[in-house]
Amino acid sequence: MSEFFIELFSEEIPAGLQRNSRNVLLENFQNLFEEKKILFKKSSSFSTPNRLIILFEGLSKEITQKAEEIKGPNVNAPDKAVEGFLRSNQIDKKDLLKKTIEKGEFYFFKKPSNRINTIDLLQEYVPLILDKLQWKKSMIWGNYNLSWARPLKSILAVFDDKSLDFKFHHLISSNTTFTDKEFEDKKKIFKNFKSYKDFFNQSGIIIDHVLRKEFIIKEIEKINILHASLLAMKRAILKLNKKPSLVLIDGNKLPYLKNYKLKYLIKGDQKIPSISAASIIAKVSRDRFIAKLSKQFNGYGWDTNSGYGTKEHLRAIKKLGITKHHRKTFSPISDLL
């Protein structure tokens, strides 16, 4: 049994866009495999800000296409219709047979059974699957006729430990990918998903978004929300492509960073326009997320209380119980356990 995985590496894409496209892309591949009778044991999708990954495990190395009769145009159809049918099936007119059915007499082609290597089929259809991917928000970047959420930089595609080679717009797939987000000549060859995942885990990048979320939650619970916020600030600053001359932080605490100029401002969102803008973006993003959750968890009033500990919310918790989204180590939830 074989393994197929593909990584689409781009400039950083917002998590919401990645999540939606990750699910759509996986579904498109599943539909293709079902249509082409490609059997597999397991399929998964993963994403990081720069990477969108699809994985299929337990794939058959080849598929057998059963013999079938393919219906063509009516025998009285124009020559162009018949020629088109011959062309699309790559056959000659001598391969056609006539058959009378309920709606009249038609041309048919008896397609023989055939064995096809899965890798050959993937090389043909993967670019078509990628072309079908529609981002909720996208644009054409640079001089390339490709609409993507952010500039697409490379495609890693591997089947059965070998590079799956195909052309997608201006990119040629390979078994290599960038190992950092600077897009420098730091590429590495990967033969399978395990070596790929292990390498990035050792580099501090958790490919699995579910495990990454669990890690973040455990980290917050371990060091508390204040220190987790300061740590997140530090990581965000260090990931900037260009070192800032000054970092303004809303509050009264600063993350520890050597050789950086940092300044905190109490009620900074009321004093500095850039902090105000960041505060608005953060609040709107959170409110949208809570609004989506409120549709999944009725009765907690999240659409009106935005998840805060209002009397209505606390009454709902006592009546309906605690969800997976409540922080169990935080009061008053911890008091109820």
Image (cartoon, rainbow, N blue to C red):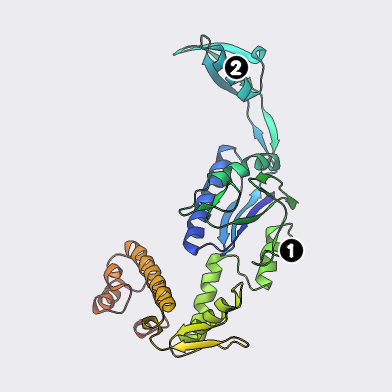
Q: Which residue has dot 2 on it? A: 83
Residue 107 in picture, x, y percent from top left: 56, 14
Residue 66 in picture, x, y percent from top left: 63, 29
Figure quadrant of residue 319: bottom left
Quadrant housing the C terminus? bottom left
Q: Report whether residue 251 is seen.
A: yes
- In the picture, measured across the screen, residue 245 lies left or right of residue 136, that is right
Tell me: residue 30, above or below residue 95.
below
> Residue at the spot x=57%, y=48% of the render?
146
> Residue at the spot x=54%, y=17% of the render?
81
Mark 1 surroundings within 10 Å by alpha-carbon count, few (fewer than 14), some (14 through 19), many (20 or more): few
Q: Secondary structure at mark 2?
A: helix
Amino acid, disc 2? Glu
Q: Residue furthest bottom?
A: 252
Residue 77 in picture, x, y percent from top left: 51, 12
Residue 272 in picture, x, y percent from top left: 41, 81
Amino acid, disc 1? Asp
Q: Which residue has dot 1 on it? A: 185
Dot 2 or dot 1, earlier in sequence: 2
Figure quadrant of residue 179: bottom right
Tell me: residue 246, above or below residue 293.
below
